[in-house]
Amino acid sequence: MAEDAVDAAIKHGNLKPSNACVTSHLPILGAYKWEPSSFTTLAQSYVRMKRTAMEK
């Protein structure tokens, strides 16, 4: 995931890297224990928080 971010920065900034990727196994902060199904849990939590805030 970090590698994708760095690759995008290199492409966008038209940069010329001086060495190979050093982040290929480095997860971005918050990626620990992330699974594709985590999005559903996150989205459901957001809706509950939003409804609770609107009810007050």
Image (cartoon, rainbow, N blue to C red):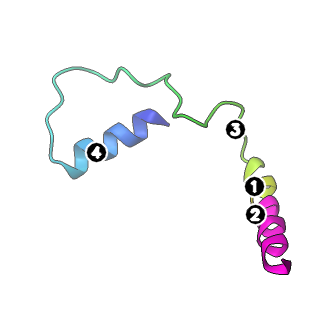
N-terminal label among 4 and 3: 4
Separation of disc 2 and disc 1 at Cα?
6 Å
Q: Please tell me whether mark 3 or mark 1 is closer to you in this view.
A: 1
N-terminal label among 1 and 4: 4
Residue 2: which quarter of the image?
A: top left
Q: Are marks 3 and 1 in contact (CB under 8 Å)?
A: no
At a point 66% along the width and 30% down the height, the residue shown is: 32
* 14, above or below 20, in the image: below
- Between 25 and 41, the residue placed more toward the observer is 41
N-terminal label among 4 and 2: 4
* Residue 55 location (% of width, % of height): 85, 79
Q: Amino acid at mark 4?
A: Ala
Residue 23: which quarter of the image?
A: top left
* Residue for badge 3: 34
N-terminal label among 3 and 1: 3
Secondary element at tag 3 = loop
Secondary element at tag 1 = helix
Separation of disc 4 and disc 2 at Cα?
30 Å
* Residue for badge 1: 42
At a point 72% along the width and 47% down the height, the residue shown is: 36
Q: Quadrant of the C terminus?
A: bottom right
Q: Amino acid at mark 2?
A: Tyr
Residue range in magenta is 44-56
Q: Amino acid at mark 3?
A: Trp
* Residue for badge 4: 9
* Residue 21 location (% of width, % of height): 33, 24
Q: Which mark is residue 46?
A: 2
Q: Amino acid at mark 1?
A: Leu
Secondary element at tag 2 = helix
N-terminal label among 3 and 2: 3
Separation of disc 4 and disc 3 at Cα?
23 Å
Q: Are marks 2 and 1 in contact (CB under 8 Å)?
A: yes
